[in-house]
Image: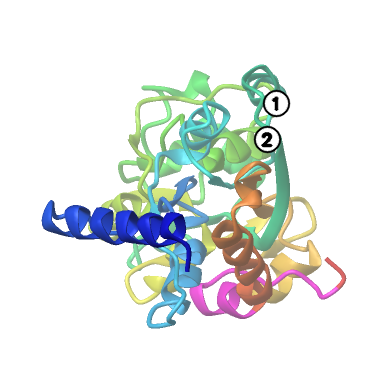
Amino acid sequence: MTALAYGARACVAALALVLAACGVREEAPAAPPPISIDGSSTVFPLTEAVVQSLAGSSDAPVVTVAESGTAGGFAKFCGNEVDIVGASRPIQTREMIACLRAGVRYVEVPVAFDGLTVIVHPSNPVNAASVADLALMWQPDSQATITTWRLVNPRWPDRPLSLYGPGAQSGTFEYFKEAVIGIGASARNDYTASEDDAVIVEGVANDPNGLGYLGHAYYERNRDRLKALSIDAGAGPVAPTAENIASGAYSPLSRPIFIYVNQAALNRGDVARFVEHYINTAQRLSAEVGYVPLPESA
């Protein structure tokens, strides 16, 4: 060994000793940031089930899931604040523009079918309602005037009408008012509103005069405390069963639900693996939480 090589090796060894004495250690690779998900409370039960299905696996990612409603979720998603948004309706033009301006490209992934379920207290004698009945209940002209069940339908009981439903940030709210009242329509606002479907469940379950609507999974979780109305769109009452939702017979309240994924986030291996797992397990888990699986072709 030359004197130069020996001296270089001695310097490296001395430097290592100095760094060790100063407490400098080689750092482990930084953990990836959590996968962030926000959006629809309707999609939340399915997303929650997907996350829980990974619990205990050695490479399970850290995932944070919030519920600020479809519109609120898209606001964060198009602001590049979250990786994935759950949506109970397709993305709207104004949201597409917001994402475009922010440079957020995305992938739309349908994950299940839902049937918006109209619920009442189990003691309520009403078992079915027409789309016209629902429109009369919820149209803005009915605010403070349609206040009893009999004012909606003369065959119904003469008792107060209490309404519960999603707030204006909810995709379920937007879908329901367009399907029932009409495209571009507004809805009455003198009702108990919440972005959390569990609040709607509690409201109707504890109010013999209550009526609300929500994602089918929340009804399935609470069917011992609620009654689902059959809906008549003109061909007779149709119950919100899995078969009727999947076939489209439960119209116009059947719909797909989605996740939207930030395309840049998919470059992260943990996000790509999570989304692949979501897609691969959505059929099984959607049925478990109360939604209707997409067909294999979808």
The label shown at residue 209 is: none
Whole-Å distance between the Cαs marked 2 and 1?
Answer: 7 Å
| Magenta stretch bounds | 284-296
First-in-chain label (2 vs 1): 2
Q: Nearer the viewer, residue 31 or 106?
A: 31
Q: Which residue is mark 2?
A: 91
The label shown at residue 96 is: 1
SS of the residue at dot 2? loop
Picture residue at 35% right of the left edge, 26% below the top? 190
Q: Inspect this view and state whether residue 31 appears.
A: no
Q: Are marks 2 and 1 in contact (CB under 8 Å)?
A: yes
Amino acid type for the residue under numbered disc 2: Ile
From this view, report whether residue 285 is shown above or below residue 217.
below
Q: How is the image coloured?
A: rainbow
Residue 11 lies in the magenta-colored region:
no
Amino acid type for the residue under numbered disc 1: Met
Q: Inspect this view and state whether residue 56 appears.
A: yes
> Residue 200, position in %: x, y?
34, 50
Q: In the image, 157: left or right of 292? A: left
Q: Mark 1, residues whose alpha carbon is within 10 Å: few (<14), some, or many (≥20)?
A: some
Residue reaching furthest to the right: 297
Q: In the image, 260: left or right of 247? A: left
From this view, report whether residue 196 is shown above or below residue 293.
above
Q: Nearer the viewer, residue 288 or 106?
A: 106
> Residue 118, position in %: x, y?
51, 55
> Residue 78, position in %: x, y?
57, 28
Q: Nearer the viewer, residue 40 or 247?
A: 40
> Residue 261, position in %: x, y?
63, 47
SS of the residue at dot 1? helix
Q: Mark 2, residues whose alpha carbon is within 10 Å: few (<14), some, or many (≥20)?
A: some
In the rendered view of the protein, which quadrant contains the C terminus?
A: bottom right
